[in-house]
Amino acid sequence: MISNYLKEYFKSKKISQYEIERKTGISQSKINLSLNGKRKLTAEELIKIAIKFDLNLNKIKEII
């Protein structure tokens, strides 16, 4: 799942939900729900996160 991939990525890089919110404009509550699998990220949100944190979109594509 994308949520697991992102959660582990941010944990390994010690990136807080606050920092994700600050860089992407996505609220912490949405981020929290998404990282815990209770809400799906929109395509726009996923792209914002990928761009701001230099994530490999091909890796994300494989997960989907």
Image (spheres, grey):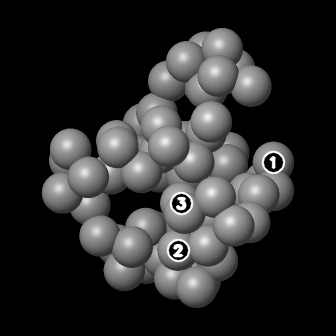
| Secondary element at image label 1 | helix
The circle drawn on residue 32 is 2
Crowding around mark 1 (Cα neighbors within 10 Å: few <14, some 14 to 19, many 20+) is few
Question: Is residue 22 shown left or right of residue 26?
Answer: left
Mark 1–mark 3 Cα distance, whole angstroms, equals 15 Å
Q: Are marks 3 and 2 in contact (CB under 8 Å)?
A: yes
Q: Residue at x 26, y 61 (%)?
A: 15
Q: Percent from the top left, x then y, of residue 6? A: 47, 45
Q: Amino acid at mark 3?
A: Leu
What residue is disc 1 on?
43
Of 6 and 51, the residue lying toward us: 6
Q: Which is more N-terminal, label 2 or label 1?
A: 2
What residue is disc 3 on?
35
Q: Which is more N-terminal, label 3 or label 1?
A: 3
Q: Amino acid at mark 2?
A: Asn
Q: Percent from the top left, x then y, of residue 22? A: 43, 78
Q: Residue at x 39, y 73 (%)?
A: 17
Q: Quadrant of the N terminus?
A: top right
The quarter holding residue 51 reads: top right
| Secondary element at image label 2 | helix
